[in-house]
Amino acid sequence: VKNLTDKPCELCNSQGGAILWQGPLCRVVLAEAGDYPGYCRVILSEHVKEMTDLAPPERIRIMNTVFAAEAALRELARPDKVNLASLGNLVAHLHWHVIPRWREDRHLPGTLWSAPARDGQAPRAPDPAQLAARLKALLA
Ligand SMILES: [Zn+2]
């Protein structure tokens, strides 16, 4: 499957990060983003472009997975804010970003995709094994 940029879809061809939780509809992976430990992505299993391409019960299921990732991150990393974003401009394969944010992080008050505001550091990296266990419990 090709994306808007005419490149093969990397989310069809790879896991997109270390798997924290996997269900039939979607998976939760840990993004490899050094400045933002705990940054998760919720990635749909199928190559689907928009939320409204999903049946209503699937929309609810993927959002509940996003909310579980947000809740697990809040418990384990205690960020100052969580950003939820679904863009898909480069990779038009439905996925949600769940990004813990801190007052002193690199981009605040901008988004992760903004120009950096400072040499920031995220202070509290959640343990991936704990994150995986919490997701499993929340999504059971
Ligand atoms: Zn895809």
Image: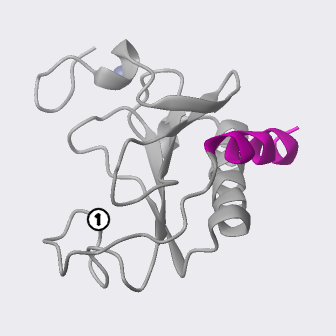
SS class, disc 1: loop
Three-letter code for the amino acid on which mark 1 is drawn: Leu
Which quarter of the figure has residue 78?
bottom right
Q: Residues within 10 Å of mark 1 (few under 14, many from 20)?
A: some
Classify residue 126 as left or right of residue 117: right
* Quadrant (top left, top right, bottom left, bottom right) of the C terminus: top right
Which quarter of the figure has residue 102?
bottom left
Q: Position of residue 107 (x, y in %)?
A: 26, 75
Q: Position of residue 13 (x, y in %)?
A: 35, 13
Give me the residue at 19% from left, 80% from top: 118
- 25, above or below 140, in the image: above
Q: How is the image coloured?
A: one colour
The majority secondary structure of the magenta stretch comes to helix
Quarter containing ligand 1? top left
Classify residue 32 as left or right of residue 125: left
In front of the other: 116 or 1: 116
In front of the other: 68 or 7: 68
Q: Position of residue 66 (x, y in %)?
A: 62, 51
Q: Disc 1 designates what residue?
A: 112
Per the image, is 135 magenta? yes
- 103, above or below 133, in the image: below
Give me the residue at 41% from left, 86% from top: 103
State the count of labels: 1
- 74, above or below 60, in the image: below
Give me the residue at 64% from left, 49% from top: 127
Task: Point out the stretch of residues depicted in magenta.
Answer: 128-140
Classify residue 127 as left or right of residue 49: right
